[in-house]
Amino acid sequence: MSKITNVSAMLLLGVAAPFLLGDNSPFVGTWKLDSRQSKFTIGDPSFMFATMQIEQAENGLKSTASGADGKGYASDFTFTCSLDGAPCRVVSMSLMRSKSAVDTVSLKRVEDRTILATGMKNGKLVYSDRRVVSDDNNTLTVARKGFTPDGKPYESTIVLLRSH
């Protein structure tokens, strides 16, 4: 290969790499709970507040979240997952006192703006999500089906707005 061809190939790869690696993911950014638009049913694990920072990571996404559940239990945690559905470990920065806390998460990208997710605790399903970023990239809607700590099924809609 000539030097010009090598340089051209490297420039093309440098320009295309962010798109090939997913750096332009609509999920990347800081998201804050919109409690007015979110819908929780009585008895399900709701949130008083939540902020999530999503960053590009090797072959996936790194999520760092801070929030408080409906009972006021604060939690800070992070996880880095590939987007192939493989489980990844949730790392807590503090004692997870909420009974609905999970210890593993899996993410599977099914469309550019849609990720299916599951949260597990001790190998048992806690929730399954459909996470969708709006066309204008400003709203992340999570349609969640799960089980309360005492085993009752619930459904909720969690709406997060992009923080600019």
Image (cartoon, rainbow, N blue to C red):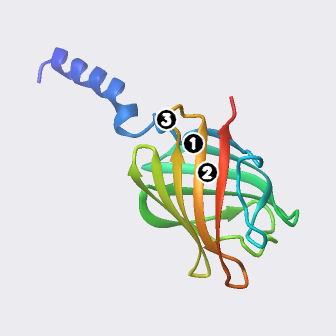
Vertical comparison of 111 with 84: above or below: above
Furthest residue in direction top, as rendered: 4
**Cα distance in 3D space between marks 3 and 2:** 21 Å
Between the residue at mark 1 and the residue at mark 2, the CA separation in whole angstroms equals 6 Å
Q: Which residue is mark 2?
A: 63
Task: State the mark number for residue 43.
Answer: none
From the viewer's perspective, is 163 left or right of 118?
right
Reading the chain from its start, which is encountered first: label 3 or label 2?
A: 2
Q: Earlier in the sequence, mark 3 or mark 1?
A: 1
Q: Tag 2's secondary structure?
A: strand
- Looking at the rendered image, the disc whose residue lies closer to the viewer, 3 or 1, is 3
**How many residues crowd mark 1 within 10 Å: few (<14), some (14–19), many (20+)?**
some
Going by the numbered disc 1, the residue's amino acid type is: Glu
Circle 3 — which element?
Answer: loop
Q: Tag 1, which secondary structure?
A: strand
- Residue beneath disc 3: 135
Q: Is residue 162 above or below residue 153?
A: above
Q: Earlier in the sequence, mark 1 or mark 2?
A: 1
* Nearest the eye: 138 or 91: 138
Q: Say which residue appears at 46% left-offset and 50% top-offset.
A: 114
Name, please, the residue furthest toward the left: 1
Query: Percent position (x, y) of residue 163?
Result: 69, 34
Callout 3 environment at 10 Å: few (<14), some (14 to 19), or many (20+)?
Answer: few
Q: Which label is found at residue 55?
A: 1
Q: Are marks 1 and 2 in contact (CB under 8 Å)?
A: yes
Q: Three-letter amino acid code at disc 2?
A: Ser
